[in-house]
Image (tube, grey):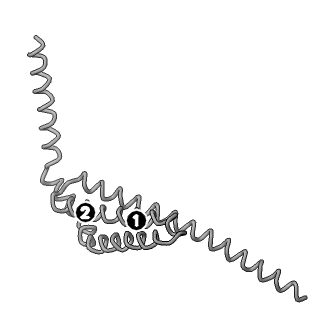
Amino acid sequence: MNTRKTLLELSRITKVEQKIKTMENKPEEQQLIKEVSSPIFQSRGWMKFIGIISIIYGALLALSIVGIIIAWLPIWLGILIFQSASSAEKAFVMGDKHEMIRSMDQLKTYFTISGVLALIAIVLSVIGLTLGVFGALFSMAHYF
């Protein structure tokens, strides 16, 4: 009795797996994924180039004492953009929606981190500029 139950469960699982595979391998869906991933696929060379440059920049930054603290950021960004380009290439060639989603997710993370870094840079610049102006005013006040 247990053997029959196990065989029925296995055949049901196999049918579900086959159904999932046939749903994922629809030619229309593959064509759509190829069309959607085409722009990223066409720019994959530049994306990989930027990724490699970011990784090299992070490695060079890590050579300094202060740079070692923040060197992980450009390395991480470089890896993200490089992996995104590789995933987009797989999505375009195979029509794989999971690779396309992975590529988009990595791009989202890349731009989120870049945006946060840009906001931090703007805030620090405003603080530095403000301190510089006040410092100049206080030093000029000494002469009056």
Quadrant of residue 2 within the rendered picture: top left
Q: Which residue is mark 1?
A: 75
Disc number lying in front (1 or 2): 1
Q: Which residue is mark 2?
A: 86
Mark count: 2
The disc labelled 1 sits on which kind of residue? Answer: Ile
Point out the image quarter for the C terminus: bottom right
Q: Residue furthest bottom?
A: 143
> In screen coordinates, is 95 left or right of 48?
left
Q: Position of residue 61 (x, y in %)?
A: 46, 72
- Depth order, front residue of 19/7: 7
Secondary-structure class at tag 2 = helix
Quadrant of residue 45 within the rendered picture: bottom left
Label 2 packing within 10 angstroms: few (<14), some (14-19), many (20+): many
- Depth order, front residue of 13/70: 70
The disc labelled 2 sits on which kind of residue? Answer: Ser
> In screen coordinates, is 61 left or right of 46?
right
Task: Report, in whole angstroms, how far the alpha carbon at label 1 lies from the one at label 2.
Answer: 17 Å
